Image (spheres, coloured by chain):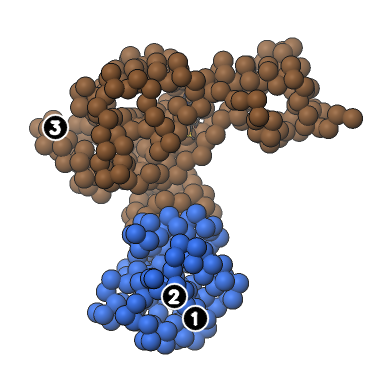
Amino acid sequence: METLAEIFTDNYRFLQQHVYSHSGIVLDHDKHYLFESRLMPIVRQLGLGSINDLCSLLLKTKETALGRQVVEAMTTNETYFFRDPAQYEAIRTVLLPELRQSKGDQKKLRFWSAASSSGQEAYSLAMLLLEEGFGDWNIQIYGTDFSSQVLESARTGKYRQIDMNRGLPSPLLARHFRRSGLDWQVSDRVRQMVTFETLDLRKSLRTLGPFDLVFCRNVMIYFDTQTKKNLIQELHGTLFRHGWLLLGGAETAFGAEQWFDKQTVQGATLYVAH
Amino acid sequence: MANALVVDDSRAVRMILSKNLREVGFDVREAGNGREALEVVAAEKASLRLVLTDWNMPEMNGLELLKCLRKDPALASLIIIMVTTETEMEHITEALDAGANEYVMKPFDKEILFQKLDLTGVRA
Ligand SMILES: C[S@@+](CC[C@H](N)C(=O)[O-])C[C@H]1O[C@@H](n2cnc3c(N)ncnc32)[C@H](O)[C@@H]1O
């Protein structure tokens, strides 16, 4: 007898293709558990019998809202404040002093958290800039993600207690957050520095930038080689000369040498735009 | 080996924290309240690097312990982390003002604890 969660081979292929075509995310053949744990809540919510029913519905109706919901359910949104602290330390000790010098007259800086998820990366940077005395500079930080759901939460700047424990130094919590019911909310001062918008990283990024620093962390890891290569080149186009690209800890930049100098600063890897 | 002291009136919490700290190479002592903690500190002063302390405990609470420890110039480089269910902003600022290096809100997991250790540099 068919268990509730079993996925037929054809449907498995359909789901892989659906997620890939809508996000660029490659899900291998051994991700049954992932489909099950992420899609069963949708199956139950719709009162369907199984993931196979969900596939039939998707195929039949071509319902875009549901299609999006499935893709968003399959993406990993995990993030936390000051993830990969060595990179923030490199920004603090190398990039910011450089920018203070080179842009001291115009006092304008622009940053981008590509694949921002719920916003911790963008807000961490905003806090760092305030702590380092850039409060009177014109600072714009963009946070983008293709999931409108995570961006909604990012815009509120509200986080659960468990998120506050992770990575965020307590003195920064005390200075930049306030209690909001059971949750915590980042201060208006910090929130004003960040703007969130939806963006698919597989699209042309030519209208964006130029930025002094781009975070593109823990998203490329889900893409295939060609998508990664294109993205690296597009990201280069959004950076000022000598601007920094920061990738996730486990990520390598395919063909990046052509566009970037790879450098290591106190254990952090960074890519400096030619 | 670096010494750490875990202060909590719950034996279960002490066990979990001690186990986690041993995993990353600490030699761990335990105390059930602030007064007991001061006795351990007096005996182990020279080698003590880290104190994890609860807030609410009988006899002497964590905040009082913290204030006591911060009065001793010989313990200036001691890392003190509050690990507590007190999660109001006033509590956090009070503990930080009294000299806590970090503040962990219960419930927490091992990963959170290790991140906090990293933030204080005590693991390195
Ligand atoms: C694991 S999170 C990374 C968050 C943060 N950058 C970090 O490193 O902590 C990955 C994010 O990438 C987003 N994402 C996946 N595919 C995307 C695409 N094609 N375009 C834009 N964002 C995408 C997901 O919605 C998710 O929020």
Task: Return the residue nearer the eye: A261 or A163.
Answer: A261
Secondary structure category for the residue under label 1:
strand
Q: How far apart are marks 1 and 3 (CA)?
A: 54 Å
Q: Please tell me the colour of chain A.
A: brown
Q: Measured along the vertical axis of the image, is residue A273 above or below residue A154?
A: above
- Say if residue B86 shows up in the picture: no
Quadrant (top left, top right, bottom left, bottom right) of the C terminus of chain A: top left
Residue A160 seen:
yes
Please, which residue is most extreme toward the front here? B1
The label nearer to you, 2 versus 3, is: 2
Q: Relative to residue B12, is residue B117 drawn left or right? A: left
From the top left corner, tell me how far across and down residue B60 is, in percent: 46, 84
Which dot marks residue A103?
A: 3
Colour of chain B in the rendered structure image: blue
Q: Is mark 2 on a helix, strand or loop?
A: strand
Chain at numbered mark 1: B
Residue A20 percent across, percent down from the top left: 57, 19
Amino acid type of the residue that numbered disc 3 sits on in the rendered structure: Lys
Residue for badge 1: B31
Q: In this view, does B54 lie to the left or right of A16?
A: left
Q: How crowded is mark 2: few (under 14 residues within 10 Å), some or many (20 or more)?
A: many
Q: Which amino acid does label 2 sit on?
A: Leu
Q: Residue at 86% x, 29% y: name it.
A: A2
